[in-house]
Image (cartoon, rainbow, N blue to C red):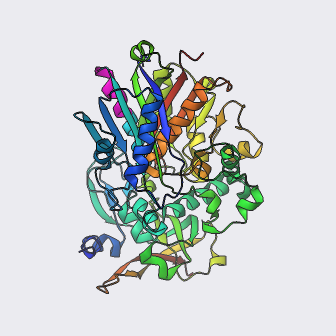
Amino acid sequence: MPEITEWRDRLWRYRLVGSKCLSCGARYYPPRNSSCIKCGGELVDVELPRRGKLLSYTVIYQAPGIYRFASPYIVGFIELEDGTRLFAMLTDVELDEVKVGMEVEATFRKLYTYGDSGHIVYGIKFRPLVT
Amino acid sequence: MDNNVVVVGYGMVRVGEYWYKDIVSIGVEAAESALEAAGNPDIDAFYVGSALSSALGIQGNVGLHIADEIGLDDFIVETISSGGVSSGLAFINGLHYLASRHGYVLVGGVEKTSDNLPTEVSEAVLVDLDRRVMKYSGLTEAGLAAILARLYMERYGVDRSKITQISVLDHENAVDNPYAMFRKAVTLDMALSSPIVADPLTIFDVSPYGDGAAFLVLTTKDRAIEDGLRYVEVAGYGFARNRVPINYREDILSFRATAKAVGDALGSAGISLDDLDIIELFDSYSISGLLALEGIGVCESGSSANEFSRGMFRRGMRPSINTFGGLKARGYPIGATTAYQISEAVIRLLSDSDDYSTALIHSMTGFDDEALAIILRRGGLNA
């Protein structure tokens, strides 16, 4: 049952939840299982800020099977307002509109569908910040 | 290190697509040629790296099957699956074996990528990176390389075209390598105008997977001298890991595992960077090679692309880089790659016509996720 892994990860994926160190404040996304890498401190779950800026990006032309329907698509390397860095697909933006440094915000979207079961996997993508 | 372990033989098959041969037969071919080069000694241990043979469902526990075919009985056989350093770890296991015992050890790796669709191979490689990070973002390994490349270009003001010069050098160096997958020189214009894999990287920034097998015979220095064999000394090694997933790192352009592994290797060999004649660099992507070279410390951060564009690192220069074509042109037989890198350095160090005496082999998984550095030195009986 491959869908079980997506189901297990659903809450942190839906809510953009990471880990926060109670001692030094370091943040991790996806959440870590054990202790803080930097200081060994205890980690708790925390909802991360939904805004950030684009540090780098790529346009994927050779996509894995589950994402082939979406190719070409853009994946960004994003720094959130609290400094947490993550990778996420960009949406609601044309290829020629993407610029390093642009402000982006999280949005809840469909990621992909499982072939046989039709099971839909949702998650977070980022779009240009609407001001 | 006390210079106790030496390489006394190597064997390779040309990296490529062997439609008519299976994984065991190419493994046997390379292993037998390594044994023959070492005078067919009795083997006491056999360590085989293979990153994907189990994952792709080709042949699990592949070391056992090769051992049986070459008629090796009653000794340790171990198959190691650790991505791009699989055969490098097989080599390290051989060193460890010989640290406490005498005799001969056969180490190396084998990979078969042409029995599956290219997309199946890419996805099997992807599984070695953080599943959650890659799957929920749609990122591929090449896509991650592309993100690193764009960040590098932005931060250091490097022109796009300079990123790919390392691949052009690889192709130049593979022209006379009988074991290379691609033996054709290319121009930078050709490389830049080829199909895009993940913007801004084209197929010339991405090293090609291929079938391959490479093995080395190791023994102790005393034994090699006793048996009258030519040898190359293993002068030192180091191994280090970086944080995974990669977005946990303070700076994703800093290959600190490579820096640590190379520093340890140089330290155990008692030499410095200036002593290196050859560097075999793990350039699975053009940008990976550039960042690794900066991690090693040969170039300042942000300057390696410019150095390649200035025409540095060609054969005969110090250091010479990827003297037989690197991963881009020799090919990237994933779990067998380090054994090719080592074999290529051994050829250079045994050669009477080449003026090389010290080589660094740099190998890694992912993007500095794990880094392995090995120092080899020209040995005795070279007349």
Dividing the picture into quarters, in which one does residue A47 lie? Answer: bottom left
Q: Nearer the viewer, residue A70 or B223?
A: B223
Q: Is residue B155 left or right of residue A53?
A: right
Q: Nearer the viewer, residue B3 or B371?
A: B3
Magenta residues (range): B92-101
Dividing the picture into quarters, in which one does residue B126 lie? Answer: bottom left
The percent coordinates of residue B191 (x first, y second) are 71, 60
Name the residue furthest bottom.
A118
The percent coordinates of residue A94 (x first, y second) are 61, 81
Q: Is residue B303 visible?
A: no
* Above-or-below relation of B155 to A18: above
Q: Is residue B147 magenta?
A: no
Q: Nearer the viewer, residue B302 or B53?
A: B53
Dividing the picture into quarters, in which one does residue B246 lie? Answer: bottom left
Q: Is residue B356 visible?
A: yes
* Above-or-below relation of B116 to B153: below
